[in-house]
Image (cartoon, rainbow, N blue to C red):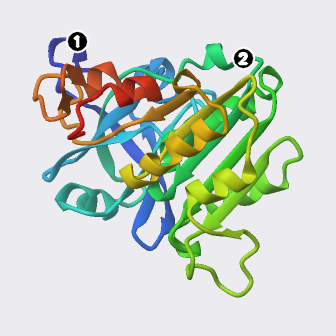
Amino acid sequence: MCDHSKNIYLPHLATVAEVIDETPDVRTLRLVFQDETVRDDFAFRAGQFAEYSAFGAGESTFCIASSPTRTGYIECCFRAVGRVTEALRRLEPGDTVGVRGPYGNSFPIEEFFGKNLVFVAGGIALPPLRTLIWNCLDWRDKFGDITIVYGARTEADLVYKRELQEWQERADVRLVKTVDPGGNEPDWDGKVGFVPTILEETAPSAENTIALVCGPPIMIKFTLPVLERLGFTDEQVYTTLENRMKCGLGKCGRCNVGNVYVCKDGPVFTAKQVKAMPAEF
């Protein structure tokens, strides 16, 4: 086994155990570390991310989308949009990838014990919350009501469709799924409308509740005022950011925003912290 403590950029090797197509251009990889010691010792918290290598193409940064409560493997979920993600998308079961991490901070899940939770996600931004959703569902007795509001442009763009069905059928979860106007088929059984609008219609109580938001910048921009109108304070609202992260170690500076490095100081922030960031962010 290589001594990874001597080279912070040296990845662990992992085997692709399973490939799951979530949408026509979004794929999940289930990865199993090849070194048994790494497999047994690798630990992370919901909200942390990793660097994934497609050898010969480079690295890409994604959250660890699986839950820390599910051991023996990790999962990442990504859209094929460039050279590295296209190379990762070509991988098949049995192929090898590199994994560096975990990096960044995490959701302070212990502070959520005894509270109600409202998850708000849009499109490909469900994976960073999925890790926390499953963490909380695996510790279900530690939380109050759990509401999930999730939307995408069309039905085809919804990720984790099998899990959405599972959450919808659970008596201890309230799932509200939606697609943008015009994005639904005739047999669509969810809402039609933009996520912030549907969130306002859903009207979760802010009392003793934490809101967890992840989505495109435009969605977050319109969701935060909705939460404010519903009575949520900025300290009750958490989001996770993945923009521009590259090295994962605060050395390349690409994710620097004002005096914050998203990779080291985040990627999890409260709404209060996000609002304090420079306007150009």
Q: Is residue 269 left or right of residue 111?
A: left
- SS at circle 2: loop
Identity of the residue drawn at 42% across and 47% down: 221
- Among all residues in the image, which is located at the extreme bottom? 186
Cα separation, mark 1 vs mark 2, equals 35 Å
- For disc 2, the marked residue is 113
Pinpoint residue 81: horizontal percent, then vertical percent.
26, 63
The three-letter amino acid code for the residue at tag 1 is Ser
Pinpoint residue 98: horizontal percent, then vertical percent.
28, 39
Q: Nearer the viewer, mark 1 or mark 2?
A: 2
Crowd tier of the residue under label 2, counting other residues whose Cα lies within 10 Å: few below 14, some 14–19, many 20 or above:
some
Identity of the residue drawn at 57% across and 77% down: 181
Pinpoint residue 235: horizontal percent, then vertical percent.
54, 21
Looking at the rendering, in which quadrant would you find the C terminus? top left
- SS at circle 1: helix
Looking at the image, is mark 1 or mark 2 earlier in the sequence? Answer: 1
Checking the image for residue 5, the label placed there is: 1
Crowd tier of the residue under label 1, counting other residues whose Cα lies within 10 Å: few below 14, some 14–19, many 20 or above:
few
Q: Is residue 203 visible?
A: yes
The three-letter amino acid code for the residue at tag 2 is Phe
Identity of the residue drawn at 43% across and 57% down: 93
